[in-house]
Image (cartoon, grey):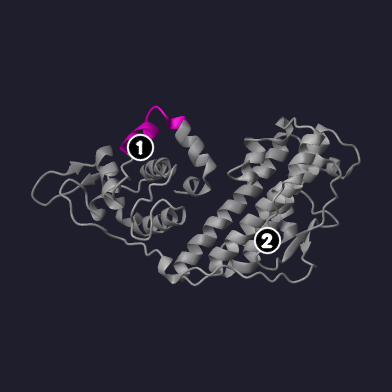
């Protein structure tokens, strides 16, 4: 359904727009594939039981998305890597989950959601919305708590209690009976897949291919104060399957437009120098052609995103923004 369910349920495929019948939801539930936690959680949700097929479906959908996020942070952060890399990954996840809380708070406020409706026996469109958004909110809070309780030592970001999440992010008194509470179930023993050491990507702060007189060098193009951040972003390109461990473009479907959006984001965030300075001749302005040529050379055959890059900067700005909105890692490039 969604590329990021926690955001899409608020803005893209809203619950209130879903007009499927109870029988249709019943059929969807029959083929539902459940996700499983990869380790014992620290928290669980105590939520009112769902009786309608619509509510059951959305609860399963949200629960699965929560588990995917939970497993991802554990796999990424409970791993052997450098302190800087783990801190970078933690901060990305932290911003992502804070954004969930902020966007859900805005949705509740903008749409005047009465969350108390989720506890009442009446079932209509408004109470269904309150029920499902309240469950989404609880899962977002639980994700944030799992992240900070397990890995907060990787960052100096502020720590919150569950009660403080209610007060700080939702401007509300914590409920007398907390919905998000300490886990009380059995220990989960799941064997994780081992990541081969040979697949470790090493970001290089410099040129990775032979010099080409038609292409700017790494130091000529990349703004020096931004070079460390740029290296970390190239690790993200590798994680997203856009480049392989040897800096080669993967040529997979849909990756070129992501690379082009990446280039536009870097342009907007001032990752590139404006001019090249020489000792014995006038400086030269860096233009768009220098940028796309640099990346086509750096990532090799199939990576020339000149057309897509120019379109995103021009006639297809709206398509570019939609792509950024749908990919959190792009949206966080500053």
Q: Secondary structure at mark 1?
A: helix
What main secondary structure does the magenta stretch of the protein show?
Answer: helix
- Mark whose residue sits in front, 1 or 2: 1
Residue nearest the observer in this picture, 277 or 4: 4
Which quadrant is the N terminus positioned in? top right
What residue is at 26 percent from the left and 54 percent from the top? 218
Q: Is residue 300 left or right of residue 34?
A: left
Judging by the rendered image, the residue that carries numbered circle 2 is: 145
Q: Which quadrant holds residue 41? A: bottom right
Tell me the magenta residue range. 306-318
Magenta-drawn stretch contains 214: no
**In the visual, does 114 lie left or right of 104?**
right
Question: On the image, numbered disc 1 is attached to which residue?
Answer: 309
Q: Which mark is residue 78?
A: none
Q: Nearer the viewer, residue 79 or 130?
A: 79
**Which one is in front, 232 or 286?**
232
Q: Position of residue 155 (x, y in %)?
A: 54, 65
Q: Residue at x 26, y 44 (%)?
A: 293
How many numbered discs, if any? 2
**Which numbered disc flags the more N-terminal residue, 1 or 2?**
2
Depth check: give the residue in front, 103 or 250: 250
Q: Is residue 114 visible?
A: no
Q: Does residue 310 belong to the magenta stretch?
A: yes
Residue 61 left/right relative to 242: right
10 Å neighbourhood of mark 2: few (<14), some, or many (≥20)?
many
In the rendered image, the residue lying farthest to the right is: 121
- Residue 212, given in percent of the width and then of the height, sits at 17, 51
Question: Separation of disc 1 and disc 2 at Cα?
Answer: 39 Å
């Amino acid at each position: 359904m969604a590329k990021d369910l926690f955001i899409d349920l608020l803005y893209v495929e809203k619950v209130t727009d879903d007009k499927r019948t109870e029988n249709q939801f019943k059929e969807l539930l029959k083929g539902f594939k459940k996700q499983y936690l990869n380790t014992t959680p620290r928290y669980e949700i105590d939520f009112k039981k769902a009786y309608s097929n619509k509510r059951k479906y959305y609860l399963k959908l949200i629960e699965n998305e929560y588990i995917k996020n939970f497993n991802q942070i554990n796999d990424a952060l409970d791993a052997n890597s450098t302190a800087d890399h783990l801190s970078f990954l933690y901060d990305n996840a932290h911003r992502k989950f804070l954004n969930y809380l902020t966007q859900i708070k805005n949705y509740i406020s903008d749409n005047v959601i009465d969350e108390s409706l989720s506890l009442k026996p009446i079932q209509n469109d408004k109470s269904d919305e309150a029920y499902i958004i309240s469950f989404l909110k609880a899962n977002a809070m639980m994700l944030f708590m799992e992240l900070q309780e397990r890995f907060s030592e990787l960052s100096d970001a502020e720590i919150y209690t569950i009660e403080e999440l209610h007060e700080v992010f939702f401007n509300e008194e914590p409920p007398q009976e907390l919905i998000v509470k300490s886990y009380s179930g059995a220990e989960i023993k799941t064997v994780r897949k081992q990541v081969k050491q040979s697949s470790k990507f090493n970001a290089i702060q410099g040129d990775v291919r032979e010099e080409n007189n038609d292409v700017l060098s790494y130091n000529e193009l990349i703004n020096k104060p931004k070079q460390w951040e740029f290296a970390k972003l190239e690790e993200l390109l590798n994680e997203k399957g856009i480049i392989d461990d040897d800096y080669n473009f993967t040529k997979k479907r849909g990756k070129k437009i992501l690379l082009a959006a990446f280039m536009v984001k870097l342009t907007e965030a001032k990752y590139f120098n404006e001019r090249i300075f020489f000792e014995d001749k006038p400086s030269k302005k860096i233009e768009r052609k220098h940028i796309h040529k640099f990346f086509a050379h750096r990532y090799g055959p199939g990576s020339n995103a000149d057309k897509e890059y120019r379109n995103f900067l021009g006639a297809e700005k709206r398509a570019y923004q939609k792509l950024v909105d749908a990919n959190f890692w792009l949206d966080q490039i500053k």
